[in-house]
């Protein structure tokens, strides 16, 4: 059975002893990330949560920094892997 590239990356992170419990996201950061997981844009998320799109981007930038990733998609992948959010 062939493993996907993402699966290989997550496996290598596990082998590197990444501690998912060390990712302390605020409730708002987690909420924004969950909406990204559901395919929403910053504008959509802002409308849902009553925030400006720039504020949503700011929350997601903080999430990326805390999770040590570059993109919001990578942040979603790490958060799902760590059990921080559940994909629908």
Image: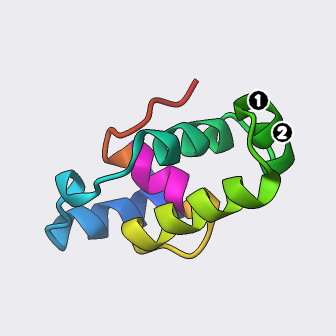
Q: Residue at x 56, y 45 (%)?
A: 33
State the mark number for residue 48.
1
Q: Main secondary structure of the magenta part?
A: helix
Q: Is residue 26 above or below residue 63?
A: above
Is residue 76 located in the magenta-colored stretch of the structure?
A: yes
**Which of the two residues, 82 or 58, is positioned nearer the viewer here?**
58
**Which of the two residues, 8 or 57, is positioned nearer the viewer here?**
57
Image: magenta residue range: 75-80
**Which of the two residues, 51 or 3, is positioned nearer the viewer here?**
51
Mark 1 and mark 2 in contact? Answer it, CB < 8 Å. Answer: yes
In the picture, measured across the screen, residue 85 lies left or right of residue 55, that is left
The x and y percentages for residue 13 are: 28, 68
Judging from the image, what secondary structure is the residue with disc 2 in?
helix
In the picture, measured across the screen, residue 57 lies left or right of residue 63, that is right
Q: How is the image coloured?
A: rainbow
Q: Residue at x 77, y 42 (%)?
A: 46
Residue 3 visible in the picture = no
Mark 1–mark 2 distance (CA, rounded to whole Å): 6 Å
Q: Is residue 87 above or below residue 61?
A: above
- Callout count: 2
Q: Residue at x 37, y 51 (%)?
A: 25
Q: Residue at x 40, y 64 (%)?
A: 8
Q: Residues within 10 Å of mark 1 (few under 14, many from 20)?
A: few
Q: Quadrant of the C terminus?
A: top right
State the mark number for residue 44.
2
Residue 78 visible in the picture = yes
Judging from the image, what secondary structure is the residue with disc 1 in?
helix
Q: Residues within 10 Å of mark 2 (few under 14, many from 20)?
A: some
The x and y percentages for residue 75 are: 51, 59
The x and y percentages for residue 62 are: 50, 66
């Amino acid at each position: 059975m062939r493993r996907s590239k993402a699966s290989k990356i997550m496996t290598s992170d596990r082998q590197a002893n990444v501690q998912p419990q060390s990712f302390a996201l605020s409730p708002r950061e987690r909420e924004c990330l969950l909406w990204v997981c559901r395919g929403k844009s910053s504008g959509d998320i802002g409308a849902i949560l009553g925030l400006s799109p720039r504020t949503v981007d700011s929350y997601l930038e903080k999430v990326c920094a805390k999770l040590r990733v570059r993109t919001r998609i990578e942040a979603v992948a790490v958060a799902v892997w760590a059990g921080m959010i559940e994909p629908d």
